[in-house]
Amino acid sequence: KLPKTNLYIKMKSVIVASLIASAAAFAPVAQKATSTSLAAFEDELGVQPPLGFFDPLGLLNGDDDQEYFNRLRYTEIKHGRICMLAFLGQVVTRGGLHLPGNIDYSGDSFDSFPNGLAA
């Protein structure tokens, strides 16, 4: 049977060893740099580290020109603005503000329809 002091020393050394081993799991790992075939667009507005140029759907395949890139950017901004207006319209309508007048020729007014999914 081991004396109590010897047991405490062994337990402390086991705890310290496990702490050191678990700290190694959080050490930074060196990553090699990756290159992309879309280097032509790496200097565009919105390119930020660590992702660089982000094209998750692969719409640009590397041989596209600046005109095509600008067209995609324009349509993305346009669709984003339309979505923001749609969200604002949803919030305003749910707040109880409806447009005046009729929505069709049969005389149905805008506020005659319920809000949200109930419509």
Image (cartoon, helix red, strand yellow):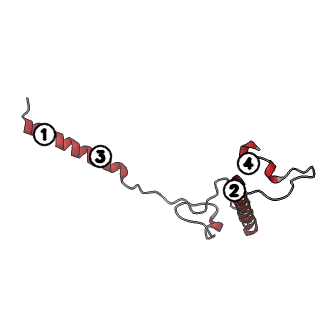
Reading the image, the residue beneath label 2 is 87
Note whether 39 is above or below 17 in the view shown: below
Label 4 vs 1, first from the N-terminus: 1
Amino acid type at circle 2 is Phe
Q: Position of residue 34 (x, y in %)?
A: 54, 59
Amino acid type at circle 3 is Ala
Q: CA distance from mark 4 to mark 2?
A: 13 Å
Reading the image, the residue beneath label 1 is 8
Amino acid type at circle 4 is Asn
Left or right, 27 with respect to 33, comes to left
Cβ atoms at labels 3 and 1 below 8 Å apart: no
- Pointer 1: residues within 10 angstroms few (<14), some, or many (20+)? few
Which quadrant of the view contains residue 28? bottom left
Reading the image, the residue beneath label 3 is 21
Left or right, 30 with respect to 40, comes to left
Q: Which mark is residue 28?
A: none
Note whether 59 is above or below 4 in the view shown: below
Label 3 vs 1, first from the N-terminus: 1
